[in-house]
Amino acid sequence: MEALALGQAGFLFSTDRSRLLIDPYLSDSVAVRYGRQLTRQVPVIVEPGGLAPVDVLLLTHIHLDHTDPDSLLPLAAASPGMKVFAPYECRTLLADLGLAWEAVAPPLEWTSIAEDLEIRAVPAAHTDLERNGEGELRFVGFLIRSGDVTIYHAGDTIPHPEIFTALAGEKIDYALLPINERNFFRDRDDIVGNMTVRETFAMASGIGAKTLIPIHWDMFAPNCVHPEEIELLYQLEAPPFSLEIMPAGAVKLLASR
């Protein structure tokens, strides 16, 4: 499986037969809505329509840098036959946008979604683990499996017991975990962070990940972590996994570890 990093939490995964996209943020809509301080710091490496054909789209939650109408509308025009798996708030937004996709709830058990792709949704806590009245998760991560390679994309989350329970027994070759710490000053400015570098390292160790790929560290100046911080702590602590930092535009062949 090949992974293309799109920046923030967005990735395009390609196998011999299928293309799976998760959380594409390929516009500057956050800055348009919330102010210039949130102008994207990394280039749009590919226009949304240029990603076609995409077979499967996964969305982890409703926040604009994960479910972005300015990215999804041109993507829909270019890949009208995509399968879409998204939490309830995202499905409502897609319907309001008039998109023809038949978005469905993320499956909580391993489900075949293409000839060479399986997925399973995992709870996420951003920064609480929330459910609606029907018990559906508001925030999710995804396990993605192709052949003998398993990827865990956590979405936006902090550690939570239900996440560890959901991942127990899974072989995780690559963990894509957010590193954009919460702190007093970010909370004061209504910037919702995720994990510190140390928390992310502890979570990667706790789920037995073979390789950590940090996400959510690069897009917005008020909500970033410098890669040098991540690399230095990795060198000092020598955790039991390999580290792969993928800036936007980076391509990596993912193989079983």
Image (cartoon, rainbow, N blue to C red):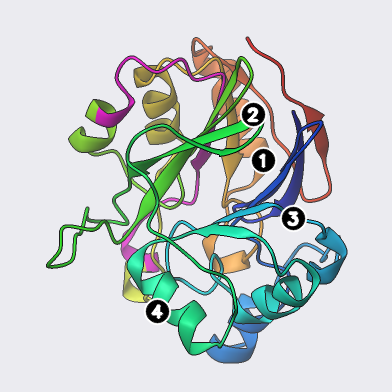
- In front of the other: label 2 or label 4? 4
Residue at position x 51%, y 68% in the image: 102
Amino acid type, label 1 = Pro
Q: Earlier in the sequence, mark 3 or mark 4?
A: 3
- In front of the other: label 1 or label 4? 4
Using the image, tell me which numbered label, if any, was put on residue 54.
Answer: 3
Helix or strand or loop: what does disc 1 sit on? helix
Please identify the quadrant where the C terminus is shown.
Answer: top right
Label 2: which residue?
Answer: 231
Q: Give the range drawn in magenta.
A: 166-186
In magenta segment, residue 86:
no
Is the residue marked by circle 2 packed among few (<14), some (14-19), or many (20+) residues within 10 Å? some
Q: Position of residue 236 (x, y in %)?
A: 55, 17
In the visual, does 122 lie left or right of 134? right
Q: Which of marks 3 and 1 is nearer the N terminus?
A: 3
> How far apart, in angstroms, are the residues tagged by discs 3 and 2?
33 Å
Amino acid type, label 2 = Glu
Q: Where is residue 238 in the image (x, y as percent from the top left)?
A: 53, 12
Q: Earlier in the sequence, mark 1 or mark 4?
A: 4
Using the image, tell me which numbered label, if any, was put on residue 227.
Answer: 1
Residue at position x 37%, y 51% in the image: 140
Amino acid type, label 4 = Thr
Label 4: which residue?
Answer: 92
